[in-house]
Amino acid sequence: MPYRALRLRLFRRFDLRHDQADTAEIDATFRGGVEFRGTNLWVLMFAIVIASIGLNVNSTAVIIGAMLISPLMGPIMALGYGAGINDSALMRSSLFNLGLAALISLIASTLYFLVTPLTLAHSELLARTTPSIWDVLIALFGGLAGVIGATRRIKSNLVPGVAIATALMPPLCTAGYGLATGNLSYFLG
């Protein structure tokens, strides 16, 4: 097979445009998940409590459930989209809402860990106190997969996997545990 034909065949195989959603639909998808109010705010609060309980009782399944329902992916994906299309207003809004969600997560998880009678730090909490370059790489490649999945005409089950791989909720709740117990190594992670 000649080089040119092979190159064309490979290009067609890896071409992302063949099932790309309409530009307006992509834009609406990313902009729709930025703000935390109403439903998103309530779902965020529930995810915080679920993640905190999961960390507290050392339940991986419960923590994964919190990762799946957490709406934190919205502003994160919109931030990347805003950077990609050079929309500074969207980037500012995404950063503000992500910061707000992180603050709410810290406050709510700290309150939970202040009132819970369970105080022992189990392996699920300990696992989130020593981040590494591998965590950064997982977040980077998970985010790239998420962007591709979010721009497709037919949405796949990719987004839940990305939510699990790049989850922020458990580390934020671990930081809340650190604040509640006065252990800064958990907070600073």
Image (cartoon, helix red, strand yellow):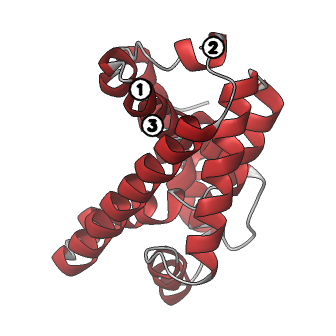
Lower sequence index among marks 2 and 3: 2
Is residue 80 at least partly visible in the picture? Answer: no
Residue placed furthest toward the right: 61
Q: Is residue 72 above or below residue 164?
A: below
Q: Position of residue 104 (x, y in %)?
A: 43, 58
Q: Secondary structure at mark 1?
A: helix
Q: CA distance from mark 2 to mark 1?
A: 12 Å
Could you tell whether 59 is left or right of 144 in the image?
A: right
For residue 53, which numbered disc appears in the image? none
Contact between labelled residues 3 and 1, with CB atoms less than 8 Å apart: yes
Q: Secondary structure at mark 3?
A: helix
For residue 120, which numbered disc appears in the image? 2
Q: Position of residue 95 (x, y in %)?
A: 27, 63
Residue occupying image coordinates x 55% and y 65%: 17
Is residue 139 at least partly visible in the picture? Answer: yes
Residue occupying image coordinates x 68% and y 59%: 46
Quarter of the image that includes the C terminus: top left
Q: Residues within 10 Å of mark 2 (few under 14, many from 20)?
A: few
Quarter of the image that includes the N terminus: top right
Q: Is residue 106 above or below residue 127?
A: below
- Tell me the residue that label 3 is attached to: 176
Q: CA distance from mark 2 to mark 3?
A: 14 Å
Q: How many marks?
A: 3
Residue occupying image coordinates x 36% and y 18%: 183
- Tell me the residue that label 1 is attached to: 178
- Tell which tag, 2 or 3, sits nearer the viewer: 2
Q: Residues within 10 Å of mark 1 (few under 14, many from 20)?
A: many
Lower sequence index among marks 2 and 1: 2
Q: Secondary structure at mark 2?
A: loop
Q: In the image, what residue type sits under mark 2? A: Leu
Contact between labelled residues 3 and 2, with CB atoms less than 8 Å apart: no
